[in-house]
Amino acid sequence: MTVKTYTLSFDTKGNNDIIDLTDRLRDCIGSSNVREGLVHVFAPGSTMGLTTVEYESGLLTDLNEAFEHLAPSSKTYAHNQRWGDGNGHSHVRSSLLGSSLSVPITEGQMVLGTWQQVILVDFDNRPRQRDIVVQVLGESH
Amino acid sequence: MTVKTYTLSFDTKGNNDIIDLTDRLRDCIGSSNVREGLVHVFAPGSTMGLTTVEYESGLLTDLNEAFEHLAPSSKTYAHNQRWGDGNGHSHVRSSLLGSSLSVPITEGQMVLGTWQQVILVDFDNRPRQRDIVVQVLGESH
Amino acid sequence: MTVKTYTLSFDTKGNNDIIDLTDRLRDCIGSSNVREGLVHVFAPGSTMGLTTVEYESGLLTDLNEAFEHLAPSSKTYAHNQRWGDGNGHSHVRSSLLGSSLSVPITEGQMVLGTWQQVILVDFDNRPRQRDIVVQVLGESH
């Protein structure tokens, strides 16, 4: 078994910008030559999150409303009172959604559902340049 | 180290049907002969979720109420307005809960807590036939 | 590739006690000699959760308010009515937050963000002695 590490870079708009990572993950898997194993994705930062979704515009709207329900941007946050950067809701959403996920690889392909994409959500309250870390672990044969 | 991939099939009732995967995962680990490593579980589909819980009927009721609180089935979803399939809440719950988890294996056993089971939640709004992907990675010795 | 398993023990206060695991994970990675791979963290128990956060007192307050919003401690839980232990909200929070996460390791270091720590949340309603399982998988070279 081997492990290969890749970094994917993105310019985001912040404010719940939702980016489809799926094709970029396929490229990493192709480069790795791993046929059987898994791809692990991690968001190094405390105002991002990772999950899967059917990437269509209706659900992107619905997800953003759900994040607003989970941790409203208009609420008073102790983080903002202490640090004044106004992104307390971004941090809380990141912690609740999580920053780590793995997808199995079999016969060189991710086993995602037909209508399932891997997404990055940038919860921060301003545009950011982001690096996502991708690891492909497994057997090439 | 080796990696073994298994597919588990289930007929679900949909509508937050909660299925205990724990015994089926133990079978996979037994077949794999892995003694030290981890079992990774993934739900390929955008209206399912995976997590752990003490699998008793009270908590299954409580979890369903929590999902209804997270993403109410009676809310208006842009997904439903666009596609008309009425399962916008199922997709949102799936994204919030997540579809990927791993449990360590040591001495050939998962290190779950005494009252902790691995569950699949089918959030879709109708019965489905579902495949769950299980990978056992590690050393057999 | 190798896998090394470690157990970290903590005395917690319960009631959403939030413990920074980051330095202890670094110790495990150092002991393992893994240079390229990942560290997997798992909470064996059904009233704990794991995630990442910027570990500063404002956000710890904000996270606790978010958990109270997700699964209020004052709500009626079927689990409590059946078992009488009063920690239904602890179980529900644990299932929603999740008990499993992995962080990539490259050049012997976790690739966490500058302001990102790995935390254990003990949601139970009383002090507990807790064991967290840490696995380091990868290549030492």
Image: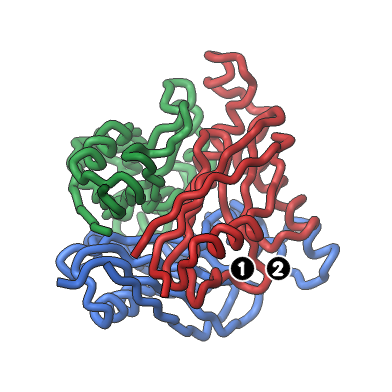
Chain colours: A green, B red, C blue
- Location of mark 1 (residue): C47
Same subunit: marks 1 and 2: yes
Q: Is residue B5 visible?
A: yes
- Location of mark 2 (residue): C87
Q: Quadrant of residue C108?
A: bottom left
Q: Residues within 10 Å of mark 2 (few under 14, many from 20)?
A: some
**Front residue of C31 and A126:** C31
- Above or below, B42 relative to B129: below
Kind of residue at badge 1: Thr
Kind of residue at badge 2: Asn
- Asked which secondary structure carries label 1, the reply is loop
Q: Is residue C44 left or right of residue B114?
A: left
Residue C59 coordinates in the image, percent (x, y): 40, 61
Residue A35 coordinates in the image, percent (x, y): 31, 44
Residue drawn at the location 71% of the way across and 63% of the way down: C88
Q: Residues within 10 Å of mark 1 (few under 14, many from 20)?
A: many
Q: Quadrant of residue C47?
A: bottom right
- Asked which secondary structure carries label 2, the reply is loop
Q: Is residue B109 left or right of residue A23?
A: right
**Front residue of A55 and C127:** A55
